[in-house]
Amino acid sequence: MLKDRLYEIGESVLRVSNADSTVVLVHGERSRLVRFANSVIHQNTEVRNIEVTIHVRFGNRAATVSTNAINDPKDIVGMVRKAEEMARLSPENPELPEVAPEGKIETSDDPFDELTAEAEPSELIAIAKRLIEETPKPFDAFGTISGGASETVLMTSEGFVGYRGVTAAHLKYNPIYDLTFGYLVQQSAHTFRDLDPEAALKRASERAPLVLDPVEAQPGKWTVILEPLAVAELLGFLNWIGLSARSVQEGRSPLAGKLGEKVFSENFTLYEDPINPRGYVLPFDMEGRRRGLITVVENGVLKDFAYDTVTARKEGKETNACALHFAQSFPMFANLHVAEGDTEYEELIASTERGLLVTRFWYSNVVDPRTLTITGMTRDGLFLIEDGKIVKSMKNMRFNVSLLDVFSNVLGVSQESVLLGETTWYGSFSVHGEILPTLKVEGFNFASATRF
């Protein structure tokens, strides 16, 4: 583990800072990614990096700098002095988040898996190789095997010390034919040993052959079975636009003023669940507040929004520890968990006389934040259900829906749920994930058809 080294770096920043207040975030990463396409492994990457972010304040004037040039103590001193110089020249900001007060919060070392943190390339390659070799013809295998360790230390001049260490592993597998027809399977876990390529191959062998001869798309309102990847896409927009206290206070969220009201289906319950061991535990936010279970929606009734100290102060209440950053305010939930239902996944399908099973969405975007209207397209598996059975695939369609309607029209929720995290990343390896079941929703609007 990098824990001691990260603490050492944080302490060195605080020792040399002359600012009124100082926040230092030190992030250590050991990650690997193997990528394959056209049934060939073509990329094998490894990242070992420590990055330090320094935030200093003189009154309400603040500045933030980041660097990974930390081998020489003079580098740290130079970055602190640069931040201090910038802060003195910055305009005053009366809405700075509160600096984390004295305290200590650490994740347990027990779940941290050093074998995943130091995984050999051969381990990831072996998983990819099996997926490639057992992909049925005429499909080619596409996907990634990725993961590693993410360790973070947050320290402040006010005396806060926080440590989060987590390991994660991901499998993303898509057998594709002719760069058009495919079916995506995705898994997230805490260790590479917990990934299940056999289950991925089994599900793909059941579904992928159906995508080779899709029927013409049929726009209109459908009963849909939304698998966890599709749920995650919609939930992300609900979280960002609808459930952040910042969005509410700035008039962008249509949920403003609706706390305590039934705004969704009684079948829909949503938690912020940051210390659930099934997920990727995140015990403190970026303002150093201890995180815990939050009931966001209970049987359709809106219970809470995501607050940081800035947004909470505006309403004269306490933060519920949803600060994503120590230098700016836009609180959001980070460990969402849609409560499981009482219906087996297969029964959701069997109880559907005519409908569509949606694997996932892509190219999604906001149409109107005031009504939470979202548009996007289906991808990697849109299947027609007739008389309770998946009978064939359908060509993809563009959807145009209000999330208020989607989550108000939940007919059923599966007993089964999965952990979904980020399988690839283009910045630092910062681990997060959601625990999601499958949802059955009526009246889901598909606005137009595609040709593939």
Image (cartoon, rainbow, N blue to C red):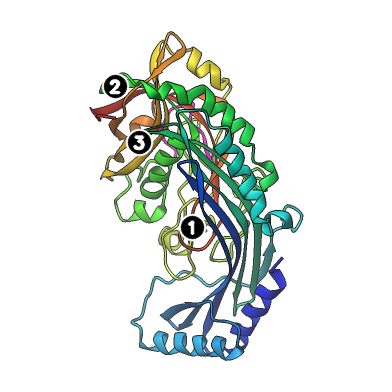
Residue 119 magenta: no
Q: Which residue is mark 2?
A: 221
Tell me the kind of residue under disc 2. Answer: Lys
Contact (Cβ within 8 Å) of mark 3 with mark 2: no
Tell me the kind of residue under disc 3. Answer: Leu
In the rendered image, residue 182, in percent from the top left (x then y), is placed at 42, 32
**SS label for mark 3:** helix
- Pointer 1 local density, CA inside 10 Å: few below 14, some 14–19, many at least 20: few
Tell which of 439 and 397 is nearer to you. 397
* Residue shown at the point (35%, 46%) measured from the top left: 256
Q: Earlier in the sequence, mark 2 or mark 1?
A: 2
**SS label for mark 1:** loop
Tell which of 208 and 165 is nearer to you. 208
Q: CA distance from mark 2 to mark 1?
A: 42 Å
In the rendered image, residue 132, in percent from the top left (x then y), is placed at 55, 38
Q: Is residue 422 visible?
A: no
Q: Earlier in the sequence, mark 3 or mark 2?
A: 2
Q: Is residue 205 left or right of residue 408?
A: right
Tell which of 329 and 128 is nearer to you. 128
- Pointer 2 local density, CA inside 10 Å: few below 14, some 14–19, many at least 20: some
In the rendered image, residue 177, in percent from the top left (x then y), is placed at 40, 32
In the rendered image, residue 444, in percent from the top left (x then y), is placed at 33, 26
The vertical placement of 329 against 352, above or below, is: below
Tell me the kind of residue under disc 1. Answer: Lys
Contact (Cβ within 8 Å) of mark 2 with mark 1: no
Q: Which residue is mark 3?
A: 403
The vertical placement of 342 against 238, above or below, is: above
**SS label for mark 2:** strand
Q: Which label was assigned to residue 317?
A: 1
Please report the bounds of the magenta region as a residue range. 260-271
Mainly helix, strand or loop, the magenta region?
Answer: loop
